[in-house]
Amino acid sequence: MFFGKPKVKKDNDRIPPNQNVTTKWPVLHVGNVPCYPDLTDWNLKIYGMVENPTTFTYDELLALPRATVQNDIHCVTGWSKLDNVWEGVAVKDVVKDVRIHPSAKYVLLHAEEGWTTNLPLEDFLKESSLLAHTHNGESLTPEHGYPLRAVVPHLYFWKSAKWLRGIEFLPLEAPGFWEKNGYHMYGDPWKEERFSWD
């Protein structure tokens, strides 16, 4: 399955204000880079305001329908990387059997090292949102989120949590790690929502 390919635009129409295009992929994070000698003990938990909390092993996740998405990514620090091709599992396929409660309005993504980030539910469930294990035809490296990262390309890239381990559905918005430390609660790159005072 392939979806989410951006419409053909001039590059300058694809670059939010005050962003610079790079062909490199800078590595930015807080804390250690997790090491997985094997994925036997790795899992992804889906919980919170759902009727059917679920835990996926890595093999169970890989058994879901595979999706490929092409998009541009924009970092809050000012770089943009165009024409990324991701492979993984569409968010809608991961959550289709958990039965999200009608009063769930937000998602808190949990990653290794206790790192979190928040999203409105409707943003997390967009067609373009993916849980990715592959970038441009190669497995993610540990520095970029191996074995699994969220990809939510319409928001600044800190919302695309690396080393994803949990998806929690909530009735109210709860700030994640960077949001508690001054980053914007939403993070729209086209509006330059970089910081809480923007």
Image (cartoon, rainbow, N blue to C red):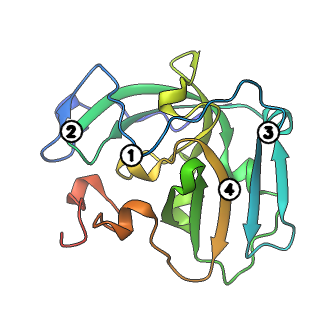
Gap in angstroms between the C-alphas marked 2 and 4 = 34 Å
Quarter residue 195 falls in: bottom left
Q: Residue at x 40, y 49 (%)?
A: 158
4 or 1: mark nearer the eye: 4
For the residue pair 48 and 188, the one nearer the viewer reads as: 48
User: Residue 121: x percent and y percent?
Assistant: 57, 68
Quarter residue 1 falls in: top right
Mark 2 belongs to which amino acid?
Asp
Which structural element holds mark 2? helix
Badge 1 or badge 3: first in the primary sequence:
3
Q: Are marks 2 and 4 in contact (CB under 8 Å)?
A: no
Badge 2 or badge 1: first in the primary sequence:
2
For the question of whether residue 126 can be seen, the reply is no
| Residue 61 - label | 3
User: Residue 161: x percent and y percent?
Assistant: 51, 48
Badge 2 or badge 3: first in the primary sequence:
2
Gap in angstroms between the C-alphas marked 2 and 3 = 35 Å
Badge 4 or badge 1: first in the primary sequence:
1
Badge 2 or badge 4: first in the primary sequence:
2
Q: Is residue 109 above or below residue 137?
A: below
For the residue pair 79 and 92, the one nearer the viewer reads as: 79
For the residue pair 150 and 124, the one nearer the viewer reads as: 150
Q: Are marks 4 and 1 in contact (CB under 8 Å)?
A: no
Mark 2 = which residue?
Answer: 13
Mark 1 belongs to which amino acid?
Phe
Which structural element holds mark 1? helix
Mark 1 = which residue?
Answer: 157
